[in-house]
Image (tube, rainbow, N blue to C red):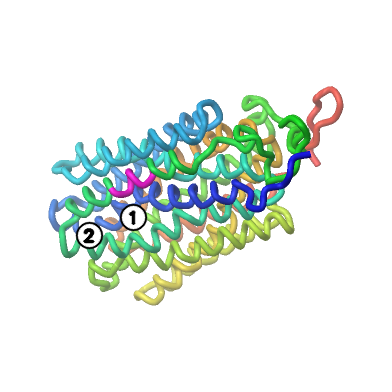
Amino acid sequence: MRKKQPVFYGWWLVLGLSVIGALGSLGRYNLTAFLPFMISELGWSRATIGLAQSIAIWLYAFFVLVSGALVDRIGSRKTFLIGGAVTILGWGLFSTAQSPWQLNLYYGVLLALAVSMTHYVPIMATARKWFRKRAGLVTGIAGAAWAVGNAVFLPVMTALAASHGWRDTSLVLGICFGLTIILVAFLIVRDTPESVGLCPDGEESGPTNSDCPASVEVSWAVKRAMKTSPFILLFITYSIYNIGLSGFAAHVVAWGTDLGSPEATAGIFSTAFAAPWALGCIAGGWLGDRYGKTRVMPIGLMLCTAAMFYGWLGVHSQPGLMALAIGVGLGTGLQVSLYVPLLGDLFGRAHVGSLFGILTFGFGIIGGWGPFIWARLREASGHYNTAALVSAVCYAAGTVALLFVRPLRVEGGGQVHER
């Protein structure tokens, strides 16, 4: 028997993943921070910029199919290294955009590719490969990283854009973020515990990795898993609720300026959204491990539904928007980090990257309409409250689909049955 390590290397990996996740996601949300400044400088409509945000999410949906498969095939380390290089290129070109087509190309294509390789799918899939018993808690910690990054950096980005211009801010931060991702991936990230002679969760093994307790888990083929009702329902839930989520996340800073907040400090509304998200991820992960993932996840979506109804009826001031951001952030965090652990529980670790990439494809293709819908409704009505109602309906529909998810059991002969 091998001696158990004092500190399981997986925890160092979680630290590295958290750094990458905190920085990689900013390639999507930089436009949220810079939106008021770009409107002032370039004179573009919210719908023009909102379309670029939707294009980025749509293409991100295609790119994560690749990045999820890359994690399973060439490994997380190489995936992050490539993503770090694309991050530098994307941020640099984004800082030079002078026309809508350039915004669509640099932000909508390049940064969408960079985010797909450094954000949620590879981060969560890698964490799930290293942990089994504490998968919910670990993915909650790793999943909270992007929210921490947004909470810390978005106010900084808006302040820097106000004092030094959004273009210089984008160029300098993009180089710093990309180089950090590359260094962390090279020095810390390893693909699986088995690749370095360990077992998931740091459990003891026998003479070979095949003696790991997790080696007996059921491993589903991707095509077979996709045909099951739990996967289809998870796909529906993850796709629909992102219409409301992505729209709110893209426009929360602009909503704050509509309500009288100065541009330089409007990033605080993103912090009010992201900080509770981070807490919710960790709490939801722990609760999911302890009480069951399919019991905890609907609670988070119900909280988001209630918060968005409040956004429709009650948000007419900056304190109201702050309360809405906190409610949506906390509710989303409670459930969002549990999709990958649940996929691993249902279908095994081997193809969790590919399966989560497929879920995120729906998240982007369907949910990617959110920023554009929010922009159109804002221009048509003069306020964002109607868009909040649309988000409430999307969250409610996702909740209903999630309530029907049931575990599967495989009997002799490979027959699948619903529990």
Q: Residues within 10 Å of mark 1 (few under 14, many from 20)?
A: some
* Badge nearest the viewer, 2 or 1: 2
Query: Disc 2 marks which residue?
Result: 36
Task: Identify which residue, 158 or 138, lies in the foreground.
Answer: 138
- Secondary structure of the magenta portion, mostly? helix
Q: Residue at x 44, y 70 (%)?
A: 313
Query: Is residue 28 rendered to the left or right of residue 95?
Result: right
Element type where label 1 sits in the image:
helix
Percent of width and height locating residue 171? 21, 48
The picture quadrant where one finds residue 409 is top right
Taking the image as drawn, is residue 371 in sight?
yes
Label 1 amino acid?
Answer: Leu
Task: Identify which residue, 289 or 57, lies in the foreground.
Answer: 289
Query: Disc 1 marks which residue?
Result: 377
- Identify the magenta region: 176-181
Query: Is residue 214 rendered to the left or right of residue 39?
Result: right
Q: Residue at x 36, y 74 (%)?
A: 316
